[in-house]
Image (cartoon, rainbow, N blue to C red):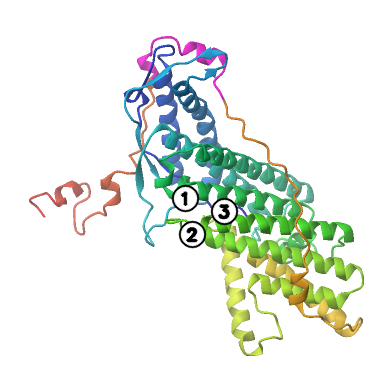
Amino acid sequence: MPYPFLLPTTSYLSFTQFFSSSTHSSLPIAATSSRAVLRDALKRHKRLSPSSQPSNLSTVLSALNSYIPYLLALDAGLSGNVISGEEVDVVLLRELEVEWRCTLSATLPGREPPRQKLKSLETEVMFTLETLAYVHSLLARAQLRPLYQSGQAPPSEEQRKQAIAGAMQHLLSANSVHNFLVQRSNCGSSHAAAVADISTSVLNALSSLALAEATLITVLKDDPYPSAVAEERNKHSKDWMFKSPDMPKVRAHLFARLCLAAAEHASRGLASVRNTKGVDESLIMYLEDLRCTARAKAARFLGVDAEGQGKVGEGVAWLRGAKKELGLLVEGEDRGLKGFSKLKKDWKEKREDKRVDRGDADWGVDAGRFEEGRVLDMLLRKWEKMNDTVNVQIVPPSEQLLASMPSGREYHTPKPYQAPSLDEDVIARMRAPPDPADLSFQSTEDDSGTEDELQPEPVGAFPGTKSDYAGRSTYY
């Protein structure tokens, strides 16, 4: 389940106050107009309910794809690069100043992250492209959500594969964007170090996170157990009888190595961001849960491989080791807390199911930990009963098995991000003098960073008279 990113908002910015071009004089004003559309789309998205935001992501993605070519054209013009076969000369009038809301920075509980004042065009490029990566991750979440909903009929096998394939492409796109930002950050940007969201360590962690999630989704495409568990608790399922899915032995071992590769990516991301100052704790916890979930999946697949070879006792040991990786209680090892722990676990699982059905913004924050625990419980009940009645085999210690896990195997080969550029006809029109009609777009939304919005309405005040109760007013 991809991480539930919060899209940032930004302040108004007029590039004509900071840049001018002797060769393409309309470029700064065209970039300003395109950015205003993106700013308005981000503000509208923020004001939507969590259940309505996924359907609005395509609008935000379209605004980003329209604005990024103009932004990169300004950046290329400052460096004297050629754009679509034309030399573009952009002159810096004064240092650019802009505000972006840092959604990955640590804040006090219950408070919205503040907007940070940033300088240079590099920070604008970094935040814009990072928002693009967030949108791709959120689109992947939106496509995967129907697979976990229990309040509606389960999707067909074809719909399930299409949703997983689409989510995988979005996560790979997010990974390529983060890698592109890491390369820009390594080139030397003194402004990026002041903000945690676009620091090199956070960008490295987000790149590893996206690749780990894409690798796990590769396994999910051919993994029948999560869909079987989801269908078992789905009230709208029409299947009254359930046949345990068959897993080929070779693919089970292959899936285990893919899960271990995902765990390694999550571990690298966790190591990169754990000691970074000012990072939101929820991102660190998600990376830790993702690492544990990936290792638990690998242990489960190794257990499936052992059970397929007739080693039921070893398969049970692998499943118990997988539950220990998740931090879940293994039945029979602590009978004193069995009843309370089971009640607490069931309550958390039901709460997560309600979050998924409602479409809350924080569903899936456990990185699939509870869902994997359900799969392990289903297999444990079946295999322990089989081992106690038919195949009486000794269950070896799970610690020795976990220590003998194989190395991970990579599946994806990340492709570099292809930065979009303006078409030849568009860049040719930029030679004309600026037209005042290019700035005809006016946002109908209030600025999301104004002080009036952050201050609560005074108690007992008449609506609309908040300004009369300001600290400098004589009425206060």
The mark nearer the N terminus, 3 or 1, is: 3
**Quadrant where the C terminus is found in the figure:** bottom left
Of callouts 1 and 2, which one flags the residue occurring earlier in the amino acid sequence?
1
Q: Which residue is mark 2?
A: 275
Residue count near mark 2 (Cα–Cα under 10 Å), binned few <14, some 14–19, many ≥20? few
Instruction: Decide: few, some or many residues near mark 3? Use Cα within 10 Å; few <14, some 14-19, many ≥20.
Output: many
Percent of width and height locating residue 314: 84, 75
Which amino acid is tagged 2?
Answer: Asn
Name the residue carrying label 3.
3
Image quadrant of residue 318? Answer: bottom right
Q: Residues at badges 2 and 3 in contact (C-beta under 8 Å)?
A: no
Query: Mark 2 falls on what kind of element?
Result: loop
x and y, in percent, of residue 137 in the image = 59, 46
Expressed as whole percent of the image width and height from the top left, the position of residue 285 reads 54, 63
Rendered image quadrant of residue 272: bottom right
Q: Are marks 1 and 2 in contact (CB under 8 Å)?
A: no
Question: Can you name the residue that lies furthest to the bottom here?
Answer: 336
Q: Amino acid at mark 1?
A: Ser
- Give the residue at mark 1: 49
- Marks 2 and 3 sit apart, C-alpha to C-alpha, by 20 Å
2 vs 3, front mark: 2
In this view, the residue farthest toward the left is: 474
Q: Note whether residue 133 is visible.
A: yes
Spot the residue most to the top.
432
Pick the residue in front: 421 or 233.
421
Q: Marks 3 and 1, Cα distance to the nearest angstrom?
A: 18 Å
